[in-house]
Amino acid sequence: MERREFLSNMGITLAIVCTGGLAACGGKGDDPTPDPPGNPPGNPPGNNAKLTVDLATQLTAVGSSIISGGVVLIRLAASNVPASFSAVTSTCTHMGCTLSGVNGGIIECGSSCGHGSKFNSDGSVNMGPATAALTKYTVEISGNTLTVK
C-alpha cells in the first residue's frame, strides 16, 4: 500500500468515526416525555405515589427541597397545603439525566450531564439548552403526610 492510499483510507476512517461520535453526543435531545421513574424505595407495589414525605420532619423550611423517587419536591410557602409545594420530574428534558439539586428555587442539571440547564420551581425552563419544561406532578396532603402522584 502506498503512502497516498494509506493516508486517504485513514482520512475516510477518521471522518466516519468523528461523524458517529457527533451523532452520539446529542443524547436524547429535548425529550418532553422523559422515561417515568420506577417505584421509589418503601413505596408498596400498586401504590401510585411517586414520593411520600412526613411534613413533621421533612421540608420544614420554605425553600427546602428533596430529590427522590424520580421527583424534585420544593416547599414554596409555610402552610401545609398542596399550593405550598412544587413537584416535578427529576429527569432533565434535554439529555435525560437526573437533576442535581435546587439552589435559590432554581432546579439545576449539574455535572452528570454537563450542559447546565436550569428550571424554575414550576418546571419551566429558566436557562437552556433544554427547551421543554419538566413534567409536573400532583401533590396531596393528609395530616402531616404529603404524597406526590
Image: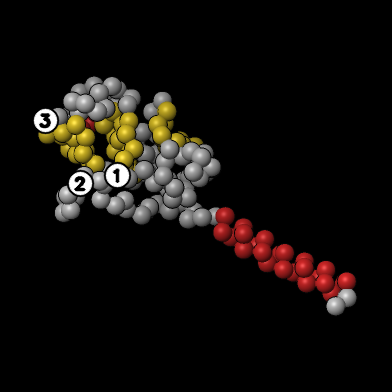
Disc 1 to disc 2, C-alpha distance: 9 Å
Taking the image as shown, residue 27 lies to the left or right of residue 85, namely right
32 or 116, which lies in front?
116
Disc 3 to disc 1, C-alpha distance: 21 Å
Please name which of the two marks, 3 or 1, marks the residue nearer to the observer: 1
Amino acid type, callout 3? Gly
Q: Tell me if I can see residue 3 in this picture.
A: yes
Q: Residues within 10 Å of mark 3 (few under 14, many from 20)?
A: few
Q: Percent position (x, y) of residue 4? A: 87, 72
| Contact flag, marks 1 and 2 (Cβ < 8 Å) | yes
Q: Residues within 10 Å of mark 2 (few under 14, many from 20)?
A: some
Residue at screen point 44% across, 47% down: 97
Of marks 3 and 1, which one's residue comes earlier in the chain?
Answer: 1
Taking the image as shown, residue 109 lies to the left or right of residue 44, namely right
Q: Percent position (x, y) of residue 24? A: 56, 59
Please, which colouring scheme is shown? secondary structure
Q: Quadrant of the C terminus?
A: top left
Residue 143 lies, with reference to residue 40, above or below; the image says above
Q: Percent position (x, y) of residue 111? A: 51, 40
Label 1 residue SS: loop
Disc 3 to disc 2, C-alpha distance: 18 Å
Taking the image as shown, residue 9 lies to the left or right of residue 104, namely right
Residue 24 lies, with reference to residue 97, above or below; the image says below
Write down the residue under mark 3.
143
Taking the image as shown, residue 122 lies to the left or right of residue 53, namely right
Write down the residue under mark 1.
69
- The numbered disc on residue 43 is 2
Amino acid type, callout 2? Asn
Residue at screen point 77% across, 66% down: 11
Of marks 3 and 2, which one's residue comes earlier in the chain?
Answer: 2
